[in-house]
Amino acid sequence: MTMGIAEPRVAAAADTRREERTDRIVGIVQRQGAPAVLILVVLISLAAFPNFRSFDNTATILVAAAPPMLIALGMTFVILTGGIDLSVGSLYVLGGVLAAWASQYGFVAAFAAPLLVCGAIGVANGLLIAYTRMAPFIVTLAALLGARGLMRAISSEGSETFLVKSDAFRRLGNGSFLDIGYQVWLVAGLVVLGMVLLARTGFGRAVYAVGGSEDAAALMGVAVRRTKVWVYVMSGLLAGVAGAINAAKLGSGVTVLGTGMELDAIAAVVIGGTLLTGGAGSIAGTVAGVLLLGVIQNLINQVGNLNSNWQQVISGTFLALVVVAQTYLVKLRRIN
Amino acid sequence: MLEVLDVSKIFPGVRALDQVSFRLQAGEVHALVGENGAGKSTLIKVLTGVYQPDSGELRYDGRTAQFGTPMDAQHAGISTIYQEVNLIPLMSVAHNLFLGREPRNRLGLLDENRMHRDAREILAGYGVTADVRRRLGTLALGEQQMVALARAVMIDAKVVIMDEPTSSLEPREVETLFGVIRELHGRGIGIIYVSHRLDELYQICDAVTILRDGKVVHTGKLADLERIRLVSLMLGREMSEVRREGATAFSGAATGDTGAAPVLRASGLTSRRKLHDISFEVRPGEVVGLGGLLGAGRSETIKAIGGAYPLDSGDVQVNGVDLKKPTTVRAVRAGIAVQPEDRKAEGIIAGLSVRENIALAVLPQLSRLGLVSESKIDAIVEKYMTRLRIKASSPHQLVGDLSGGNQQKVLLARLLATGPKVLLLDEPTRGIDVGAKAEVQSLIDELAAEGLGVVLVSSDAEELIEGADRVVVLRDGVVVGVLTGAQVTTEDLMSAIAAGGNE
């Protein structure tokens, strides 16, 4: 017995070293893959399209990416817990309509109305998912339908478009600081807040823990249900804010937006390296994912003769590639 | 300090705990032993707030206590290390260690640097030197277990419950673990230690409580209890009462040892930590039993032969033909049929009919150009339903609606339909009623008589003794004895299992 043990141990130590190295490399690819691709695409664009270079164009990309960024931010938290939120597209339109309608009562009301209603729907989502253990897919699908119905009800079947009455609110949509739109600053602030929340607070760790292994998290004393409720509330609130800032930009509550936005958000989060099964991922990745989709759209607009539907073909292809790569990387980590 | 009084817990159809009383003193290492289904896990879950007892009382620190959730128990100072490590593989080692108790900086945010530093220091005391920023899932199982232990001890535990903590540890790691246990012991922490490794129990435990069928059959100082007595209490056989003939339907006639060439020869089966150089052979018409306690490597051996458990080295031969590295496909082609231990998870498909379940494995043999002859399937299904006396309203009844015994027969029918040469049975009569049990047992006899080689794993000592012509006894993945002929008795089996670890 004693003789036989020594040799495997040496081999095991070498194994461990190799495992550690593979793990580190795979980890870097998983975390930094999306930003790296984003930089690559931007560099190619700079070389190929003279117009891409202009500051105006950059500002356009950022402003266009602001609402999707907020939705994807909320979605990142939800997906990290292993859930999904399909209701955000509807909440986004609902938020926009509510903000435009409430702007007649002033700036604060224009934010409060969408926050209250979308937040309440988020609470309902979260409570149903956490306490009745219904599938997030079904619960939020119901909320998607419900919120869309609510939006149509208050806008007379979608035919009535509320105009933004508050000047202050409209300035939020059109004004800028250092030539970059206020809404971009707002979104950037919320993203940084989200990063701190996720990386440096107990709540953030709980989010990862719930997604990593719900049972283990419960046994380790994580408040699983409370964590779940909060991520759906956040997702709802952020979708509401996204709708509000979009209404501020457009000057009205447009009722025909938002279809499929939840899927774009999910795509951006997954492209950003967050596992759809939960437990691993980052907001930095999501930011890169959203910007990547935005840049691709911008490029396709620049190539004048290309139908904008090609943007979805390219995004779809991208998503498929990322998912395949993720599956492979995860397997690589497990086997070792 | 932690005590349960007359606690009962009833699940549909099972009395998992029946008036169980158990008392853990401060600074005591208390062994909790019993075979599968004896109620150990249920008792632990009652102690840690996962289950609520149906009746009886839980006392902690001299007061009546009630733990509504595992959290309540943890806050009260009861920590548990579960059999499968219950940490989060995707999170870093340090985060796992500190989850919920992370050090904060002045702004109330997590202080990562301090956390990593503390984690390194704490884990060094447990012999874990891996980078604490690595994902936990990339560590060896033994190291993960140490992290779990460190976590448990960190939260000011007064009671630590360890459920088979050494099952995935290497000898060196076991030493480290024992060092930690002795230290905890010195600090007056009570430890409940669940293990099937008798050597370990005698090395580290002060007291023992033995459970069987949901009842306490013995409790007291471990040093006062002989090994063989412990084993007989666990398995539920009074040595003086052991009768050679009786409770099972096996004929008892030794059918094997015909001098024929072995149909199955396993040699040198070795798999990291679980199996060490296991060799045995089975002749046609012979029933070879694999004996040993839970975790001795019986199921792993069977799975390895069937190609469903990874082997580091070792050969499997069927009728003298080497399987090379066994895979499930090669094993099935060579004529090895495995009946897995967990019928529901790995065997039958509850949502399919009896007919579909039986035909599943023979489909490749029956199909021409990918098309399957329905009439051939009907013939096979008909044959085995009659032969095995499967009681179903029709071949189209869903298997999930049948009784456990009939489900088991459907599974056997599927295996037999492939025309195997060797049948590997893992707990073929577990969880089925007495009548069906007898039928399955006599069926095994019949099959052997027809020339099949059979390997039988059973936790039921009587079934093993009376069913097998020879018994290969395993302990900790090593063959520790082979009982043949007149030696195949419950007494010999128990002494082989209990024999000291001084080889």
Image (cartoon, rainbow, N blue to C red):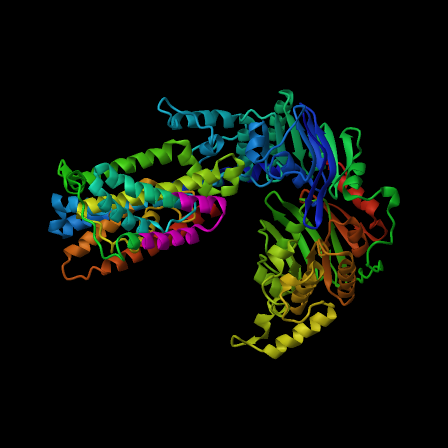
Query: Does B202 sit left or right of B116 as displayed?
Result: right
Q: Quadrant of residue A29?
A: top left
Residue at the (73%, 42%) spot, across then down: B214
Predominant SS along the magenta part: helix
Q: How many marks?
A: 0
Residue A72 in percent (x, y) is at 31, 46
Residue B30 in percent (x, y) is at 70, 30
- Please state which of residues A28 and A221 is positioned toward the viewer in this rendering: A221
Query: Does B310 sit left or right of B250 as displayed?
Result: left
Query: Does B365 sit left or right of B441 as displayed?
Result: left
Q: Could you tell me which quadrant the N terminus of chain A lies in?
A: top right
- Please state which of residues B334 and B90 is positioned toward the viewer in this rendering: B90
Residue B38 within the magenta-colored segment of the rendering: no
Q: Quadrant of residue B199?
A: top right
Residue A222 in percent (x, y) is at 48, 35
Q: Which residues are magenta?
A: A123-150
- Vertical side of A304 occupied by A189: above or below: above
